[in-house]
Image (cartoon, rainbow, N blue to C red):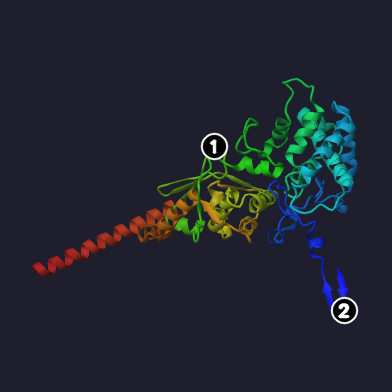
Amino acid sequence: MEYKGDVVRINVKEMLEGARAPVTAECCIYKVPFSIRRHNEEAYTPKGVSIGPFHHGHPRLQDMEKHKLFYSMAFLQRSQTTSDSFIGKIEEMEPELRRCYSHTLEFSKEQLVKIIFVDCAFILELFCRFGSGEWKEDMYLSKPLTMRSMRYDLLLLENQVPFFVLERLFNLSFSSRGDDFPSFLQFTFHFFRWINRSSLNFNNNNRIRHFTDLIRTFHLQDPLPSRIDGKIIKHLPSVTELSEAGLRFKVLESESCLLKFDFSGRVLEIPQLVVHDSTETLFRNMVALEQCHYPFQSYITDYLHFLDFLVNTNRDVDILVQERVFLNWLGDTDSVATMINGLVKDIVLPNISSKYLDVSGKLNALHKNPWRKLKSALRRDYCRGPWQTAASTAAVILLILSFVQTVCSILQVIHQ
């Protein structure tokens, strides 16, 4: 910048020389946008272990760093490569690696290589130990609370390294093993088998970008429904309102895909959802990934958007719990309703699955049907239980008999 009298001259060419696109085609690991993150900061922040550059150096996570170094050393002893080869491979991938992150990484090449070296070797050793059962001998990681916390930390969107980096380092480390030795994908599926609801196998051809992407894939059905551009659900009655209109809710038995459901007649069948302490964390990170990376294939967001319409109060939750559609491990039904309503706050939904759009139209039509409302109101007010039904039936019979007797009396008078 040059000063000439009162005029300031800016060297635009020099200023723009280092300009780069903030997000590239290779980008797949994102910092969660503030508009979403502010609703639950803790859901996106690791509690025990940092993976990758975004949360590296956080004071709360320093206790785990020594353990990561111990695991890194153990992995090098287990593997068939040297530390120089391992680091050399990371240096080779470093430019490609940087492009996977949504924000500019303020680390030198040497610093970033060191972070990736420790974090990847730690994950590879962890997966190997978990696959063989050796992790149970670790006095630190064998504690249920520690292992549970770490499992969820490995699923957070901001706490990732690209899957291809881990896979290449694994292949380098076990290059001379036989064909019967498990692949890194097999080790990964084994470690996360507790969340593989759809029973996806490791022969699946989907490209996995990182562990958050993997759990999203676990929840998707195949084939996926089409999406309708510019169409969204504008209104849908709640579970209570639909129940009062005569709709029955039923758990869709033996259905592995959470997003699949069936509507026929007056019955809406929905796969069972287990609601526990970490349900919100899992859904929030999958939704954040879809907002950043899959804005036009946001199938998890579609499901939660649909659920947000259905569930407004604890009464709605109670009905779904009674029908085993929800397994409520939180205990408090108000907490379940609050969680569901908060998951899609400030979420952009440019279009929606044709399946949800079709069902919402049918549910709205059912709710507007006056005959169904009348029939349901009569059933609700006069037939809540066997005794009330019997009493209501007896009252109707007495009313009819009284009416018949009155008619007969009138006819008798007329004929006289």
Q: CA distance from mark 2 to mark 1?
A: 79 Å
Using the rendered image of the protein, determine whether residue 141 is visible from the camera's viewpoint: no
Residue 5 is labelled as: 2
Question: Which residue does the numbered mark 1 point to in the structure image?
Answer: 254
Residue 399 in the image: above or below residue 120: below
Identify the image quadrant of residue 197: top right
Q: Amino acid at mark 2?
A: Gly
- Between marks 2 and 1 in the image, the one whose residue lies nearer the viewer: 2
**Residue 2 in the image, given as x and y percentages of width and height:** 87, 70
Residue 112 in the image: above or below residue 133: below
220 vs 141, nearest the viewer: 220
Q: Is residue 31 left or right of residue 142?
A: left
321 vs 196, nearest the viewer: 196
Residue 312 in the image: above or below residue 224: below
SS state under label 1? loop
Q: Residues within 10 Å of mark 2 (few under 14, many from 20)?
A: few
**Split into 4 quadrants, where in the image is the N terminus?**
bottom right
**Residue 85 in the image, given as x and y percentages of width and height:** 87, 31
Using the rendered image of the protein, determine whether residue 209 is visible from the camera's viewpoint: yes
